[in-house]
Amino acid sequence: MKLVTLLVKPPPPLLQHPSTMCCTPSTLLLLSLASILSVCSSDAKNMLPSEVETIFKIMDSISSDEKWRISYPNPCNPGSTWLGIECKLGQDNHLHVSRLDFGTHPNPTCKNTATFPYEIFDLPHLQSVFFSQCFTHTETTLSASPKRGGAFFDSSLQQLSLRSNPALVGPIPPQISFLKSLEILTLSQNRLSGRIPVEIFSLNSLVHLDLSYNMLTGPVPIQLGNLNNLQGLDLSYNSLTGPIPGTIGRLGMLQKLDLSSNSFIGTIPYSIEKLTLLTFMALSNNKLRGSIPKGILKLQSLQYFIMDDNPMYIPLPAEFGKLVKLQELRLANSCYSGTIPPSFSLLVNLSTLSLQNNRLTGKIPEGFSSLSRIYHLNLSGNLLGGVIPFNASFLKRLGRNLDLSGNPGLCLSPSEAYNNVKSGSGVGVCGTGSLIKKSQAAAHGLSKLFFLFATLVFHVIHQKLF
């Protein structure tokens, strides 16, 4: 009876076997669901097949550095990416290409047959793309996919930069205005031609626009004023004509303006005074003339004003002396006349002052000697006179960065003529030059008298003999 009791004794409870604790039906169901979700999530983080194919088409047309399909079969997966590509996880839980960078090492370099890959506009999540020194041999144009009828896809592109591509030719396509998210557009140092399309000025998100070093022609459209978020505008080194549009005064956020080396005519528009955040303004090598707006003194953030090589034919404006943050003031080769305003001595932050090859007269302002931050001063090729108001320490500090040559009336005080100051500044020592000139004049006078006397004697002898 005792044996029977042992046989019918119930087995130990499940709690005594931890390895079997999770095996309840509800627990197994939860684990199965979690496993399925994990697998799905892992698969979802891969790129979409269509996007993978697009990126390989771009790489095959641009670069022969690698066999891209073989070396990087999953371009966005960790361990399979290359320098020059960045990816981000989208809201659809797929990886998408967000940045492409071509042309310069260590990024993928471009082969000689590379042409502009319009397929970049088929990457809807692409935010930034850079082509630098990429299109150098085979001529190509900035264009969109033919299957879209030449229209740009309304993508997420925020930055488009094509710089130093000598084989990039043709006009800037007006369809670029479809890129409504664009904030930075750089098309510099290419061979783009034609007029700036009006449509480009509908890109209200633009913060920086650089079209410099191309072959663009025609006037700047008045629609320029629509870019009210613009902080940087560079149209330098083109062949743009006409006046600077007055609507430029509506660019209230502008900090950098470069219109140099074009063929702009007329005067600086009065509306320029509204650009109170401006720190850099370059208008050199144009055909601007006439007065500079007195309102320019309102540009109290201005640090660089560069306006060489314009036929101004006016006295130097004293208003420049009130721009106390100026670090560089360049007004050379522009036919300025009159004296140098004493107010220029108030520019205590000035490091460079270029006034060469004008028609300036009078003396150098005494206050220039107190400009402690100046390291480059060029007043050559004018009609300045008098004693140079600089002490030996000033002259030594500037050295060869001081050019006063071509001013016949200027001279250096003998007490300040130390070391190589004389040759460095381009002027002589007071008294020395004048004595030489007097001696030369006296010698010239004596020789002239001797010539007249000899002629007279010869004439008298001639008459007596004949």
Image: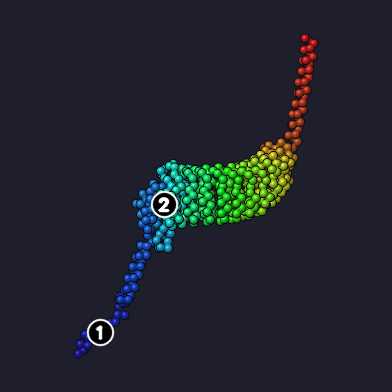
Residue type marked 1: Pro
Q: Is residue 224 above or below residue 314?
A: below
Q: Which residue is mark 2?
A: 148
- Inspect this view and state whether residue 153 appears: yes
Q: Nearer the viewer, mark 1 or mark 2?
A: 2
The kind of secondary structure element at disc 2 is helix
What number is the disc on residue 10?
1
- Image point 42% across, 49% down: which residue? 117
Query: Where is residue 179 drawn, in percent x and y?
Result: 48, 54
Label 2, residues with CA under 10 Å away: few <14, some 14-19, many ≥20: few
> Looking at the figure, which quarter contains the C terminus?
top right
Query: Where is residue 47 drawn, in percent x and y?
Result: 38, 58
Q: Is residue 310 above or below residue 42?
A: above
Residue type marked 2: Arg
Q: Is residue 46 above or below residue 264?
A: below
Residue 64 vs residue 10: left or right?
Answer: right
Label 1, residues with CA under 10 Å away: few <14, some 14-19, many ≥20: few
The kind of secondary structure element at disc 1 is loop
Query: Where is residue 113 drawn, in percent x and y?
Result: 41, 43
Residue 42 vs residue 364: left or right?
Answer: left
